[in-house]
Amino acid sequence: MNPLAMMMFLTSLAIGTTITLSSHHWLLAWIGLEINTLALLPIMTKTPHPRAIEAATKYFLTQATASALMLFSCLINAMQAGEWDINTPSNLMTNSLSIAIMMKLGLAPMHFWLPEVLQGISLVTGLILSTWQKIPPMILLFQISYNINLSLTVILGLTSVLIGGWGGIGQTQIRKIMAFSSIGHLGWIIIILKLNPQLSLFNFILYTIMTTAMFLSMIMLSATKMSQISTSWTKNPALTTTTMLVLLSLAGLPPLTGFPPKLLIIMELIKQNMFISATLIMLASLLTLFFYLRLTYIIALTLSPNTHNSTIWRTPTKPWLVFSIINTMALTLLPLTPAILLT
């Protein structure tokens, strides 16, 4: 793709996100989301492959449906309340609006588009879709969190964690595994949204850091399948080791970065006397833990039969500083959790 065109599309992504984040008006927030969607479509199809075209088509149809439902909900709210302010949603409109935003995020049961879309696009575009594109809808959910239906968030959160674990078990394509991982993590974020929005925001920030680190690792290793990861040790042992640790961090194992949000969410659910929800979400997360451990096993305990005895690591010239900072944050933020939560 022409660098000038790519810069224009990335600038449009930034502008759309900024409009949504800074707006107090539902129509402006909707326009920002639409700019984001339309800016990502050409980036998805920069390699004119049939799978990329299919992924872009599925993404466009899903986002258009969610946008239509969102605009309809905003119009109903404007008719009832007489204003478009984001902080004054009516109860009738909040449920349909929440479902529309959750469809944009890829939460279960509106998740069917996400694995297929991620599988059909490049790793760099997948990184944008899994992190940057989730920021504007998530911020809108935070803004209406005080008025959101608790039963809706708990049911969708539990369903997302369950499907995120169940769907990822039989996968061999890493992009699909990351898609189901995203669904599971969003379930953890949504289930606590009504009860403690600050904790949801903390979890979302850590999810973004860990997902960025994992996608950057895959980009560095040029790996999209499990079989390619199993041969990566001979190419770059240090990078393969940090990739394994990032996977364990995504699984939520202590003492890595992914552990504190899960611990704090379970503690908050118990504090709110939601013992059944806490038990169910812990049991559902064991499914997610299984496929993370399977990936870690493939990286750490299997070795390709065609290894060589060369001691020279093939390390191409890439932005190692940015990668090192993101990886360090994805692994070592546990001691800083109290300080982060107090700010």
Image (tube, grey):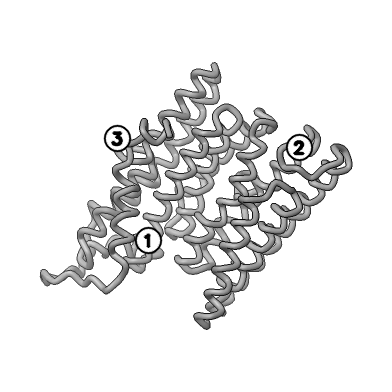
Residue 271 coordinates in the image, percent (x, y):
50, 18
Q: Residue at x 60, y 51 (%)?
A: 136
**Which residue, given by chain and number where applicable, does mark 3 sit on?**
335
Q: Residue furthest bottom?
A: 2
Mark closer to the chain start, 3 or 2:
2
Q: Residue at x 60, y 50 (%)?
A: 106
Q: Residue at x 50, y 80 (%)?
A: 3
Query: Which kind of residue does numbered mark 2 sit on?
Result: Pro
Q: Nearer the viewer, residue 55 or 5?
A: 5
**Which residue, given by chain and number where applicable, does mark 1 sit on?**
216
Query: Which kind of residue does numbered mark 3 sit on?
Result: Pro
**Which residue, given by chain and number where applicable, does mark 2 sit on?**
89
Mark closer to the chain start, 3 or 1:
1
Would you say residue 275 is visible in this rendering?
Answer: yes
Query: Which kind of residue does numbered mark 1 sit on?
Result: Leu
Disc 1 element: helix
